[in-house]
């Protein structure tokens, strides 16, 4: 019997780097993470090599047992060249050929992928999208990222800037987005922008009675005493969700607003790509059916009448492992046939 | 030297059926058309068989020289089964296995395709998209249809209802669309809906001075004397474009509105699919650079600042032949390797 072969998945985040294995039957190992070091590209690459080496030792793998390494990372990049152009959350990494450098140091072929694409491919291979079918992933966090898998392949776009689903325009001439556009889905439905919306409602309607006000005022006071780098967000979607569960009306309004815009984006995605599945991941999806239910209700209401709504909207199954699994999967796709 | 081999392309429209050949080197023959007969599926299929037979005779082709037949048709369909569910413009065709029936009668394998997808694939193979690269097509007519080609393949979607770009939602809670959604791109930027918008402006602002008013009032008067089936559209985009060229302010406003919404749709398409090309076809594209220039200007203004706008917006090159060429191309894709 042939020995199992593996790909290593590395998920580079602003705080941690996550490591794991994916074998040829799509079975995945336990993962572990190391802190993301400061100081630019060199220490980050050294940490990746250290983590990958530790992973191989732990599973008693020789180089010959490892088919390839996949690195998922945020930030604008030239995916096919393996180059990270910049990383907003990790200063000091610019025009870095991270794919090639990690591969050279390990002596194993390596490939780079955008983190949202990797998470999408991970859910496709081993999570909510397992079993095949076209799939679109939305990551609901500070921003909204996206991944598209059609016919089993990650869609990168002609200039490798596709699947930026957070920047679908859902409100023409709407809220300004960090990207320079106005009215992006991200500006209306990302966790941080929804929290910001709640704050703007509190600021505008001083007499509005809501349990969110006490939290907001307390954090504001604390922040006034803190240095800039210690300041914390004055309201977040975990606060909003907790207040919503307790029956707070403003929290319910904010939650519904997010669900509505997500559904609006999902209708446009369905019209363009008609996927089997739209998979939501990220902090807000901890609410489970409390998120899927209102999103699906809005989706069915906003959806055309020419066909029944067929695309399913679900929550991802891999949690924080999706990016690591997908990165390893991308390595399988790149090097598995060789 | 091997004899040339051909696929037959058939483009079924509400008024005419168009016929032509595409050889293995993507060279296409002259086309001809026959009227679309009334009376349901049987006479339509008979006309297709007659046209295909005439085409083969004209080019002295035996069955063995023809690799396959592609039929492009409007209306909801189950593409992979070759079944037309209904045809709004050709009454009497319901749940018709048109692909199989045409193929059987000709004794040549046949395949069915949505007409906008076929036009997109035609432009991809032989027109504006020649040379490869990912491409999105928009047909600007009574409605707005769409075709998507990624990695050389037509994207149908998991339930074969993808690429409905006219039904991207560009104005949440906006104008009702015939599809049951509100705020569809089609409701804002199709030729017929733009003409309708011009009429609504004339009706609302009775004192607005514009050369369009005389045309509108004259046609309204004529229509009052006509029977229902003889009534003509009281204003169309050819009128609007002519008035715009002559410096009419309302016409310029209507034209700019269409360009703006098309650009808005193109930005969302770019964020999702990042194609090399967005190709516009249909009546309004007769305006040439007078359409492309304002659409591109709005596109660049609405586009994010994270990357330069790279997707090009251009006008199709095949005119009314695109659907026929694409239908033949789909037959090549389906049967060419066998």
Image: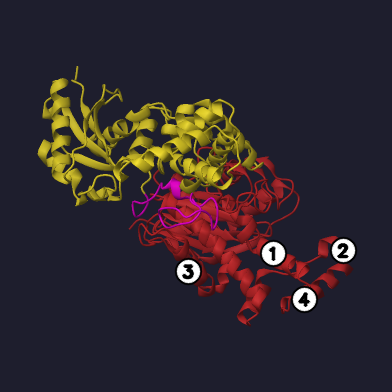
Chain colours: A yellow, B red
Q: Is residue A169 magenta?
A: yes
Residue at the right extreme, as displayed: B225
The chain to which mark 2 is attached is: B
Q: Which mark is residue B207?
A: 4
Residue A189 visible in the displayed image: no
Query: Are labels 4 and 3 assigned to the same chain?
Result: yes
Position of the N terminus of chain A by quadrant = top left
Q: Residue at x 66, y 64 (%)?
A: B194
The image shows residue A93 at horizontal and vertical percentages of: 21, 49
Write the start and end of the magenta stretch as one range.
A157-184
Real-space CA distance between mark 1 and mark 2, rounded to the nearest whole angstrom: 24 Å
Position of the C terminus of chain A by quadrant = top left
Q: Nearer the viewer, residue B59 or A230?
A: A230
The image shows residue A250 at horizontal and vertical percentages of: 58, 36
Q: Nearer the viewer, mark 1 or mark 4?
A: 4
Residue at the bottom extreme, as displayed: B246
Instruction: Give the SS element for disc 1.
Output: helix
Instruction: Give the SS element for disc 4.
Output: loop
The chain to which mark 1 is attached is: B
Left or right: A19 in relation to B188: left
Residue at the top extreme, as displayed: A1
Earlier residue among tags 4 and 3: 4
């Amino acid at each position: 019997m042939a020995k199992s072969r593996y790909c290593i998945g590395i998920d580079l985040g602003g705080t941690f780097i996550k490591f794991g294995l994916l074998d040829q039957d799509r079975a995945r190992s336990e993962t572990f993470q190391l802190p993301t070091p400061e100081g630019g590209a060199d220490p980050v690459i050294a940490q990746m090599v250290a983590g990958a080496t530790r992973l191989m030792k732990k599973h008693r793998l020789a180089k010959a047992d490892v088919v390839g390494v996949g690195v998922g990372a945020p930030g604008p990049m030239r995916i096919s060249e393996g180059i990270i152009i910049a990383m907003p959350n990790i200063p000091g990494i610019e025009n870095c050929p991270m794919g090639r450098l990690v591969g050279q140091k390990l002596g194993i072929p390596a490939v780079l992928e955008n983190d949202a694409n990797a998470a999408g491919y991970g859910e496709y291979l081993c999570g909510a999208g397992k079993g095949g079918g076209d799939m679109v992933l939305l990551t609901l966090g500070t921003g909204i990222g996206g991944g598209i898998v059609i016919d089993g392949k990650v869609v990168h776009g002609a200039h490798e800037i596709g699947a930026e689903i957070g920047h679908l325009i859902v409100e023409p001439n709407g809220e300004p987005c960090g990207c320079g556009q106005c009215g992006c889905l991200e500006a209306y439905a990302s966790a941080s922008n929804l929290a910001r919306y709640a704050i703007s409602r509190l600021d505008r309607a001083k007499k509005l009675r809501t349990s969110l006000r006490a939290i907001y005022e307390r954090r504001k006071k604390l922040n006034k005493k803190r240095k800039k780098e210690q300041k914390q967000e004055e309201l977040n979607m975990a606060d909003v969700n907790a207040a919503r569960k307790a029956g707070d009306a403003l929290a319910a309004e904010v939650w519904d607003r997010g669900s509505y815009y997500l559904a609006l984006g999902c209708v446009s995605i369905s019209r363009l790509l008609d996927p089997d599945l739209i998979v939501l991941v990220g902090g807000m999806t901890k609410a489970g059916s409390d998120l899927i239910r209102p999103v699906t209700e809005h989706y069915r209401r906003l959806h055309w009448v020419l066909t029944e709504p067929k695309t399913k909207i679900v929550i991802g199954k891999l949690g924080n492992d999706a990016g690591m699994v997908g990165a390893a999967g991308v390595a399988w796709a790149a090097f598995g046939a060789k």
